[in-house]
Amino acid sequence: MRKFWLAGAVMTAMFAAGPAVAGTLQVQDGWFRALPAHLPAGGYFSLHNGTAKSVTLTGVSSPACGMLMLHESRNEGGRSTMEHVGSIAVAPGDTLKFTPGAYHLMCMDPKPAMKPGATVPVTFEFSGGATLKADFAVKNAKGQ
């Protein structure tokens, strides 16, 4: 399996929940919104593709989640929907933002590590077998 990451950048992210850099792929501003009573947690971040080729994000995982999925929320004709997304292509030079009300991560069955003030690891999986690791801050229901 091919891995893209720089040890120093990942080490910084592990301790400061800062950006993780993989070659020229960057995950920045990663955080989860933890909700009470074991409700699913939403995850948000920016993924920048600084490479010369399109990359396809195919999955995510975290030991802090029973299952972690790529999701998209949409508002169509005044009706909000949310659905699982199998993969997302990111063109060269583009930044894909995962934000509330749009693309986001859905952490089903959050584990005890998913508590405000904590930092949890997330592994991003790309077509071709590449992976990228980043740490996400865990915030409360108000995003603080």
Image (tube, rainbow, N blue to C red):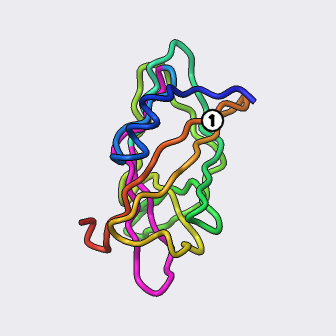
Does the magenta run of residues contain 68? no
Does the magenta run of residues contain 32? yes
From this view, report whether residue 40 is shown above or below residue 103: below
The image shows residue 88 at horizontal and vertical percentages of 57, 40
The total number of labels drawn is: 1
Q: Is residue 29 rendered to the left or right of residue 103?
A: left
Residue type at mark 1 is Thr
Q: Which residue is mark 1?
A: 131
Q: Residue at x 39, y 64 (%)?
A: 118
From this view, report whether residue 135 is shown above or below residue 21: below
Q: Residue at x 58, y 70 (%)?
A: 108
Q: Residue at x 64, y 68 (%)?
A: 66
Image quarter (top left, top right, bottom left or bottom right) of the N terminus: top right
Q: Which residues are magenta?
A: 24-45
Q: Is 29 in front, or is 101? A: 29
Mark 1: few, some, or many residues within 10 Å (few <14, many ≥20)? some
The image shows residue 44 at horizontal and vertical percentages of 40, 53
The image shows residue 27 at horizontal and vertical percentages of 43, 37
Q: Is residue 35 rendered to the left or right of residue 113?
A: left
